[in-house]
Amino acid sequence: MTIPIEPQRPQLMQNDPFSKPGYTDNFYDAVGGHDTFVKLIDVFYDGVATDPLLRPMYPEEDLAPAKRRFLMFLEQYWGGPTTYGEERGHPRLRMRHMPFKVTPEAKDRWLSHMRKAVDALELPPLYEGTLWDYMERAALSMVNSPSAP
């Protein structure tokens, strides 16, 4: 039995996965895979690198190891390669962030840099909203200290 190939549809909007041949039920692939997540991480850490509140939470001189860990985590979470789990095991996000005072102000600053990064991706609204919803919930769950007096 031969399955007919559908003709390619005109692209309706930038990064529209339904205009491309082959449907995917994987968020990672639907938003552009590795290149999309690399861009997200690069734009995010460009902001963190110069942020006086957040930068001290990254004890390594070079942000490259933090970028790699976050990239691996997000890729695995959204359906990409499972490198994070293979190298680091279960994420245990709250436990891994406990050594740092994550205040509501730090959360807001983190979200500010992440907002710029998500916006830089120019994703279709459904994907942008899905990604942003996760980032907001994740950031809120990391708060472990009250605001400074």
Image (spheres, helix red, strand yellow):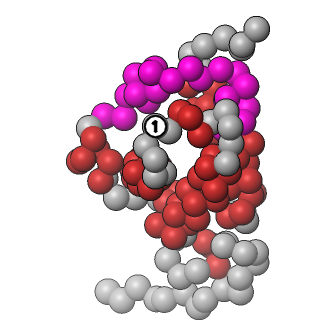
Vertical comparison of 65 with 141: above or below? below
Residue 24 visible in the current orientation: no
Q: Is residue 118 left or right of residue 82?
A: right
Task: Please state the horizontal and vertical placement of residue 116, each as a whole percent of the image.
Answer: 74, 53
Task: Name the element at disc 1.
Answer: loop
Kindly give the residue lying farthest to the left in the view shown: 86
**Residue occupied by mark 1:** 59
Vertical comparison of 12 with 113: above or below? below
Task: Please state the horizontal and vertical placement of residue 42, each as a whole percent of the image.
Answer: 58, 60
Kindly give the residue lying farthest to the top in the view shown: 149
Image quadrant in which the N terminus is located: bottom left
Task: Please state the horizontal and vertical placement of residue 104, each as a whole percent of the image.
Answer: 70, 21
Residue found 76% across the figure and 75% down from its top: 13
Residue found 72% across the figure and 13% down from its top: 148
Residue found 64% across the figure and 56% down from its top: 46
Q: Nearer the viewer, residue 101 or 39?
A: 101
Q: How crowded is mark 1: few (under 14 residues within 10 Å), some or many (20 or more)?
A: few
Q: Is residue 7 left or right of residue 84?
A: right
93 in the magenta segment: yes
**Amino acid type at image mark 1:** Pro
**Magenta residues (range):** 90-110
Vertical comparison of 56 with 144: above or below? below
Residue found 68% across the figure and 64% down from its top: 121
